[in-house]
Image (tube, rainbow, N blue to C red):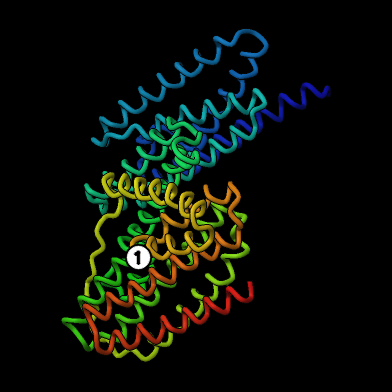
């Protein structure tokens, strides 16, 4: 037996095996259907894959027109079977027809030597076919605003981002449209992930889940929401304080992720202080949860974060901070950068963190940029404490204040150690 014959048999065998994978899933889904009521079962799918494999071989040896002709023939048989099945059952679904055409195509690919593509297509198809109840369940739970938010995320990431030039413009060449918008996509994606987490697990399942997911969406928004609840329900102050501290700690971890993605040279200097801040904050939150006597579970709604208006505003803020960062460093050196970090931290840590990725490409010392990010995070945390004091006061302010004091001490220790 020649090597060429072995390769042909291997390709045809793979075509049969991959079609059977799809056929097993289809057969299981339609296992309760009466004999003759199914469009195609396991054996039929196996034969379809085998037909595709043979068509691929004949296409190579005789004419490639055999492949589309075979696809049309298989499609015609499946359509005829579908018409008969629909008359008997009264149900309408073209899924099995599409699966049959995929099985044929997979067979052709396997016979032509595209084993990896054929295998991947068959496995992914079987998984998608088996996920029907799950996918339909998700669709039933998705609201119109969430669908629009997902489409917006696709718009800003898949459509707009590739069209933007990847070059520096303006003073200091600080304005890179591609990188600025890519960072907008990154933050929007993280925010949407947090929103999805709240929707999946439910805010009313407990303050802890809400605080964790809210830390991805906006720890500032969580601080505002929890402080307002504490002002109306003081008996929940300890649990609500734990939620604020936990959300803020998640923010420190988010900064580490952003630095790792956008400014890897800063990671070594940023990771240790931020990690210590996060660990200290999470430990304080855990202690507060442990002692919390909160029995009520307020339903804290987090609005959909993915709106084009806020996304564009964030991009503009990022561009402004990028320009100011170069200017402040040129005019005042490290001191100017620290001052800008403090001012930026009042409003947004993410924008300042992301702006550092452009700045370190110049002559800015990495240690200065890393410490500036930490300054912004500390100022942002103190800003949240001031919100708690102003809105809730009393017990919640005391607990949050003690936790934040520990976090700041941890930050100082981390800076010294780093």
Q: Nearer the viewer, residue 39 or 111?
A: 111
Residue 22 seen: yes
Q: Is residue 389 above or below residue 102?
A: below
x%, y% of residue 125? 48, 39
Q: Nearer the viewer, residue 246 or 120?
A: 246
In the picture, residue 241 is in which quadrant? bottom left
Q: Secondary structure at mark 1?
A: helix
Q: Residue at x 28, y 44 (%)?
A: 308
Q: Is residue 76 above or below residue 100?
A: above
In the picture, residue 63 is in which quadrant? top right
Position of the C terminus by quadrant: bottom right
Q: Nearer the viewer, residue 171 or 267?
A: 171
Q: Is residue 208 above or below residue 118?
A: below
Does residue 302 appear left or right of residue 67 in this picture?
A: left
x%, y% of residue 363? 60, 50
Does residue 269 appear left or right of residue 312 in this picture?
A: right
x%, y% of residue 5? 77, 22
Q: Is residue 324 above or below residue 12?
A: below
Would you name the residue on which mark 1 appears? 346
Number of other residues with Cα within 10 Å of mark 1, as a class: few under 14, some 14 to 19, many 20 or more: some
Does residue 142 appear left or right of residue 111 in this picture?
A: left
How many labels, in total?
1
x%, y% of residue 249? 44, 72
Q: Residue at x 58, y 36 (%)?
A: 18
Q: Residue at x 50, y 63 (%)?
A: 335
Q: Which residue reaches farthest front?
A: 331
Position of the N terminus by quadrant: top right
Residue 27 seen: no
In the picture, residue 37 is in which quadrant? top left
């Amino acid at each position: 037996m020649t090597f060429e014959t072995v390769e042909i048999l291997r390709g045809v065998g793979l075509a049969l095996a991959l079609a059977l994978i799809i056929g097993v899933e289809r057969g299981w889904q339609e296992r309760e259907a009466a004999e003759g009521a199914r469009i195609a079962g396991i054996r039929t799918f196996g034969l379809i894959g085998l037909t595709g494999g043979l068509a691929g071989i004949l296409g190579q040896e005789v004419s490639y027109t055999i492949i589309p002709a075979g696809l049309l023939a298989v499609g015609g048989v499946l359509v005829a079977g579908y018409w008969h099945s629909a008359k008997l059952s009264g149900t309408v679904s073209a899924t099995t027809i599409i699966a049959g055409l995929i099985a044929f195509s997979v067979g052709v690919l396997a016979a032509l030597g595209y084993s990896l593509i054929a295998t991947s297509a068959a496995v992914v198809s079987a998984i998608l076919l088996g996920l029907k109840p799950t996918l339909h369940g998700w669709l039933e739970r998705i609201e119109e605003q969430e669908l629009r938010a997902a489409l917006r995320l696709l718009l800003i990431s898949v459509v707009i981002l590739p069209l933007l030039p990847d070059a520096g413009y303006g003073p200091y060449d600080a304005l890179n449209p591609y990188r600025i918008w890519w960072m907008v996509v990154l933050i929007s994606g993280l925010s949407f992930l947090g929103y999805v987490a709240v929707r999946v697990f439910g805010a009313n399942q407990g303050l802890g889940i809400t605080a964790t997911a809210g830390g991805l969406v906006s720890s500032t928004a969580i601080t505002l929401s929890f402080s307002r609840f504490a002002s109306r329900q003081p008996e929940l102050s300890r649990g609500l304080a734990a939620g604020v501290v936990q959300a803020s700690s998640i923010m420190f971890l988010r900064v580490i992720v952003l630095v790792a993605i956008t400014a890897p040279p800063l990671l070594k200097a940023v990771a240790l202080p931020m990690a210590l801040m996060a660990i200290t904050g999470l430990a304080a939150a855990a202690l507060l949860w442990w002692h919390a006597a909160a029995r009520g579970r307020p339903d804290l709604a987090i609005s959909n974060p993915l709106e084009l208006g806020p996304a564009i505003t964030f991009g503009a803020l990022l561009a402004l901070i990028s320009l100011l960062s170069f200017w402040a460093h040129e005019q005042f050196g490290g001191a100017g950068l620290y001052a800008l970090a403090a001012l930026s931290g009042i409003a947004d840590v993410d924008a300042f963190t992301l702006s550092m990725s452009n700045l370190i490409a110049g002559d800015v010392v990495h240690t200065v940029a890393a410490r500036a990010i930490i300054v912004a995070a500390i100022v942002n945390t103190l800003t949240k404490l001031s919100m708690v004091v102003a809105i809730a006061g009393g017990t919640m302010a005391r607990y949050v204040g003690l936790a934040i004091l520990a976090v700041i001490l941890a930050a100082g220790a981390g800076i010294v150690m780093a």
